[in-house]
Image: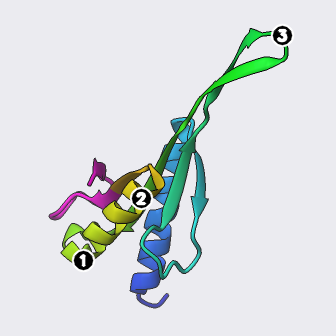
């Protein structure tokens, strides 16, 4: 087999992050071949409560816009600020998913709010 490309490593990492979030109960959309600021969008469902006849009060869910990087250092300050601004403008949260630095940490996944 040939050497894994950076695209393949990134794709596999995005799927790993998606699977992790889905196990936690999130609904996740992946932006295929993303050229934008977010690689994933994760949605936590809101709650509707009946407060009277034919009326409901909706407690809104949470939305995360997530940039995935196999190497945290590859997430530039400009990208970080752009994702943060987009999320703030939409009223959502911006997150970075990355692997732990160093050898032997291939499977460690970190999610941090930016």
Mark seen at residue 78: 1
Q: Is residue 2 magenta?
A: no
For marks 1 and 2, the one nearer the N-term is: 1
Residue beneath label 2, please?
A: 89
| Marks 3 and 2, the one that precedes in the sequence | 3
Question: In this picture, which residue range is highlighted in magenta?
Answer: 96-114
Residue sitting farthest toward the right: 54
Please provide percent x and percent y for residue 62.
Answer: 50, 39
Of labels 1 and 3, the one closer to you? 3
**Label 2 crowd (10 A; few <14 / some 14-19 / many >=20):** few
Q: Residue furthest top?
A: 52
- Asked if residue 88 lies left or right of residue 50, the reply is left
Marks 1 and 2, Cα distance to the nearest angstrom?
A: 16 Å
Report which residue position mark 3 lands on. Answer: 53
Color style of the picture: rainbow
Q: Which mark is residue 5?
A: none
Lower position in the chain sequence, tag 1 or tag 3: 3
Tag 3, which secondary structure?
Answer: loop
Rendered location of residue 108, percent (x, y):
29, 52
State the SS at label 2. helix
Check the picture and name the quadrant holding the C terminus: bottom left
In the rendered image, the vertical position of residue 84 relative to residue 3, given as above or below: above
Do we see residue 4 in this rendering? no
- Choose between 78 and 8: the one closer to the eye: 78
Q: Are marks 3 and 2 in contact (CB under 8 Å)?
A: no
């Amino acid at each position: 087999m040939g050497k894994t490309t950076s695209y393949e490593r990134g794709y596999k990492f995005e799927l790993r992050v998606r699977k992790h979030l889905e196990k936690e109960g999130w609904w996740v959309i992946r932006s295929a071949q993303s050229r934008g600021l977010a690689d994933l969008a994760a949605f936590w469902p809101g709650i509707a409560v009946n407060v009277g006849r034919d009326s409901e009060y909706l407690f809104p869910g949470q939305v995360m816009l997530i940039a995935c990087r196999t190497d945290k250092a590859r997430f530039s300050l400009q990208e970080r600020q752009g994702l943060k601004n987009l999320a703030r403008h939409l009223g959502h949260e911006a997150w970075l998913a990355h692997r732990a630095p160093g050898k032997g940490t291939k499977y460690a996944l970190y999610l941090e709010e930016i």
